[in-house]
């Protein structure tokens, strides 16, 4: 059995992971306008600074080469509080603005970090590219298929670095798993199972419409979504509604789908079928609590299974993520199972590590190869900062992010179209001969929060 020990893991982290970006330069002239010189601080604007946005800001501030110069949030209470907090932490008070477009107008800003609700990701990233900023944007990169393609077009047109927050692509243990598979050690892969099994989103008896809080710019928060009066259910539980999110397949499942797609070396499925429903939930919400999708690739099938109930399924916790441990695979809620002709690989995201099992011997498991994992947030930020300077495409380039997000959107569009099997044209990324599904492929924006056809 091949096992990488702790020392080998750390050595690999230092020597290979931080330089793991694809060696593709985004510009003919790597000295791109606004590319931060190697000896200068990267000046960042944080767009959305609540939970994940605050976590990202903390990680960038912990680096010696980054400084938050703008805090952008539609809540003045949240924004002012974070600006004061960040100022104390980094020794320089960032400027707070409620409308992040003011930060885009500042030529001193090198890049923006987008951690808004999902429905804002594409438009914020596109505006950032148009303003000459590099972009770190949280997953999923898009709310629908069309706007994700517009993100890619904007990144290429304005020659911007756009890193999607699918940080598994920067993890040393995942790079080792990819190498193991690419070298043929798992054999031919014909089946991959992807899981996302978590707790309930909550139940709502009704959507209540009230006046928005005085400190909140609700119109901007709602942004490119269809117009709506303020509702605490929509505002605080936006993952439960199609207008803002794609459910938990988009929220968390996209991490596993992206990792699985990368490891298996597949791009576009030929067809997608998805079924499910809200079976365990009472009350109202849009997204299902039970969801199964089947993706047909060339000589390979990938499945995705979601449940949003049951406290017996556990995410990989911090203790496992940062230690030499593996999850209990049957009850790991975010695992991937890759079935090759020479063995099966159990893969954990965000630091769960991986193990390859072959035929048991004397009723005991036989582990052929394995590697412990670590949470890859820091190395993903390192890759982003390196690419701002080198102008090479990052590990989780927006094109990779778009193709993985399509797996989310294809499944949801099948589900929302009554469980139809949707054929996919890889040249256009569109549905074949299905006007009902195509009605979900793109949605109109809301003035002035509109992504133009020509970005």
Image (cartoon, grey):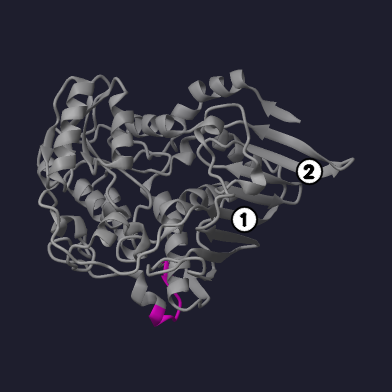
> Above or below — where is 162 with respect to 287?
above
Q: On the image, numbered disc 2 is attached to which residue?
A: 358
Crowd class of label 1 (few under 14; some 14 to 19; many from 20; radius 10 Å): some
Tell me which numbered mark, 2 or 1, is placed earlier along the sequence.
1
Can you say whether 302 is above or below 20 in the image? below
The Cα atoms of the two marked residues, 2 and 1, are separated by 17 Å
Please indicate, yes or no, whether residue 161 appears anywhere in the rendered image.
no
Pinpoint residue 255: horizontal percent, then vertical percent. Answer: 47, 48
Badge 2, how many Cα within 10 Å: few under 14, some, many 20+? some
In magenta stretch: residue 431: yes
Q: Which element carries disc 2, helix, strand or loop? A: strand
The one of 443 and 162 positioned closer to us in this rendering: 443
Q: Quadrant of residue 270?
A: bottom right
Q: Are marks 2 and 1 in contact (CB under 8 Å)?
A: no
Specify whether residue 448 is painted magenta. Answer: no
Rendering quarter of residue 446: bottom left
Q: Quadrant of residue 80?
A: top left
Q: Is 279 left or right of 448, judged from the image as shown?
A: right
- Identify residue for label 1: 193
Who's the residue at 43% across and 50% down the image? 400
- Which range of residues does the magenta coloring cover? 429-436
Residue occupying the point 36% across, 38% down: 25
The kind of secondary structure element at disc 1 is strand
Q: Which mark is residue 369?
A: none
Left or right of 319, for residue 186:
right
x and y percent of residue 15 in the render? 50, 22
* Picture coordinates of residue 181, whole percent (x, y): 65, 43
Name the residue nearer the viewer: 413 or 177.
413
In the rendered image, which quarter contains the N terminus? top right
Q: Would you say residue 319 is visible in this rendering?
A: yes
Q: Residue at x 15, y 41 (%)?
A: 77
């Amino acid at each position: 059995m091949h096992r990488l020990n702790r020392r080998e893991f750390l050595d690999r982290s230092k020597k290979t992971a931080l330089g793991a970006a694809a060696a593709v330069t985004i510009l003919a002239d790597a000295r791109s306008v606004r590319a931060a010189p190697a000896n200068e601080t990267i000046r960042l604007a944080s767009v959305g600074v609540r939970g994940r946005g605050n976590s990202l800001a903390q990680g960038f501030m912990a680096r010696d080469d980054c400084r938050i110069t703008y805090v952008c949030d539609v809540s003045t209470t949240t924004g002012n509080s974070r600006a004061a907090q960040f100022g104390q932490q980094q020794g320089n008070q960032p400027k707070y603005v409620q409308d992040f477009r003011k930060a885009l107008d500042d030529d001193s800003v090198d890049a923006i970090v987008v951690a808004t609700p999902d429905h804002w990701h594409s438009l914020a990233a596109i505006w950032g590219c148009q303003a000459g900023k590099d972009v770190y944007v949280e997953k999923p990169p898009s709310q629908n298929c069309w706007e994700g393609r517009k993100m890619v077009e904007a990144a290429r047109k304005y020659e911007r670095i756009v890193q999607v927050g699918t940080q598994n692509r920067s993890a040393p243990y995942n790079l080792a798993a990819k190498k193991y598979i690419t070298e043929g050690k798992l054999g031919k892969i014909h089946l991959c199972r992807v899981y996302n099994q978590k707790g309930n989103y909550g139940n709502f008896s009704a959507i209540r419409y009230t006046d928005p809080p005085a400190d909140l710019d609700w119109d901007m928060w709602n942004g490119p979504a269809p117009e709506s009066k303020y509702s605490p259910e929509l505002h605080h539980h936006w993952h439960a509604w199609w207008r803002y999110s794609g459910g938990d397949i988009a929220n968390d499942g996209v991490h596993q789908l992206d990792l699985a797609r990368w490891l298996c070396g597949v791009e576009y499925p030929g067809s997608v079928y998805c079924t499910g429903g809200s079976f365990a939930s009472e009350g109202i919400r849009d997204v299902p609590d039970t969801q199964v999708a089947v993706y047909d690739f060339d000589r390979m099938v990938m499945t995705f299974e979601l449940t949003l109930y049951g406290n017996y399924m556990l995410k990989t916790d911090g203790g496992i993520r940062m230690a030499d441990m593996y999850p209990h695979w049957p009850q790991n809620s975010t695992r991937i199972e890759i079935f090759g002709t020479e063995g099966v690989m159990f893969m954990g995201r965000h630091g769960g590590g991986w193990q390859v099992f072959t035929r048991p011997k004397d009723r005991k498991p036989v582990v052929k190869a394995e590697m412990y994992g670590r949470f890859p947030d820091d190395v993903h930020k390192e890759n982003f900062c390196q690419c701002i300077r080198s102008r090479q495409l990052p590990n989780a380039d927006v094109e990779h992010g778009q193709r993985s997000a399509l797996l989310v959107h294809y499944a949801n569009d099948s589900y929302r179209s009554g469980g139809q099997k949707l054929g996919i044209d890889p040249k256009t990324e569109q549905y074949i001969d299905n006007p009902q599904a195509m009605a979900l492929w793109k949605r109109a924006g809301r003035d002035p929060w509109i992504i133009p056809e020509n970005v």
